Amino acid sequence: MFRNFPKIGYVLDNKILVATDIFRRIKLSSLAENELLLVDYTIEAGQRPEDVADILYDDPKLYWTVLLVNDIVDPYNEWYYSPEQLEALVEDKYGAGNGSNTHHWITLDNPLVCVEYDTAKLAAGEIKEVSHLEHEQYENDARQDISVVNPKFIQDFLTEFNRLINE
């Protein structure tokens, strides 16, 4: 992945060390303006970025394009979890047997708004409890649908990426 990145010199102990500039970033906006370039993809349970790249491009080494297009820096924590992985995450994060405990409260008219617990509003049916598991499921569901480079244009994308990274 980094072989096409530019080199940078660092001075250490009065010596110049040449290293790959892995922190070089490009703006995808110029690439993503073309509506035909990106297509929607739904991640199946258990699929990793390498699997998606292999399915779409016949090359698992192009996994980084899937991550780049979706602005994913940490594929272990920002990628879609399978049901088994999600269950393990909830147990690790909140403790064994605590998945059904309250994570937060929401209003029924807008489930994206978190509110304080209120006995009167609960009795009136205006607010609802969201468990740790429900919260993590909601977060996970938002990661399942991603954008990917249209397989027809992957070579064009790679060429343009290489050009931009070396500017």
Image (tube, grey):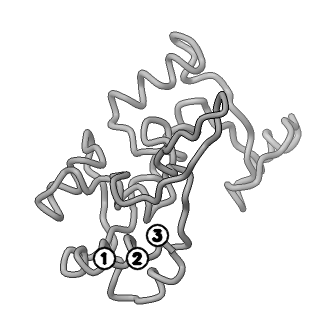
Q: Which mark is residue 122?
A: none
The residue singled out by tag 2 in the image is: 163
* Marks 3 & 2, CB-CB < 8 Å contact: yes
Residue at x 63%, y 22% (from the top left corner): 101
- As helix, strand or loop, the secondary structure at mark 2 comes to helix
Q: Position of residue 90 (x, y in %)?
A: 51, 24
Q: Residues within 10 Å of mark 2 (few under 14, many from 20)?
A: few
The residue singled out by tag 1 in the image is: 159
Q: Residues within 10 Å of mark 1 (few under 14, many from 20)?
A: few
Left or right: 12, with 71 as reference point = right
The amino acid type, in three-letter code, at marker 2 is Arg
As drawn, 28 above or below 62: below
As drawn, 41 above or below 53: below
As drawn, 167 above or below 57: below
Q: Which label's residue is closer to the chain start, 3 or 1?
A: 1
Residue at x 46%, y 70% (from the top left corner): 166
Left or right: 54, with 36 as reference point = left
Q: Position of residue 54 (x, y in %)?
A: 16, 54
- As helix, strand or loop, the secondary structure at mark 1 comes to helix
Left or right: 55, with 29 as reference point = left
Q: Position of residue 136 (x, y in %)?
A: 54, 37
The residue singled out by tag 3 in the image is: 166
Displayed quadrant of residue 80: top left
Q: Nearer the viewer, residue 127 or 116?
A: 116
Nearer to us of marks 3 and 1 is 3
* Marks 2 & 1, CB-CB < 8 Å contact: yes
Residue at x 22%, y 51% (from the top left corner): 61
Displayed quadrant of residue 144: bottom left
The amino acid type, in three-letter code, at marker 3 is Asn
Q: CA distance from mark 3 to mark 1?
A: 11 Å
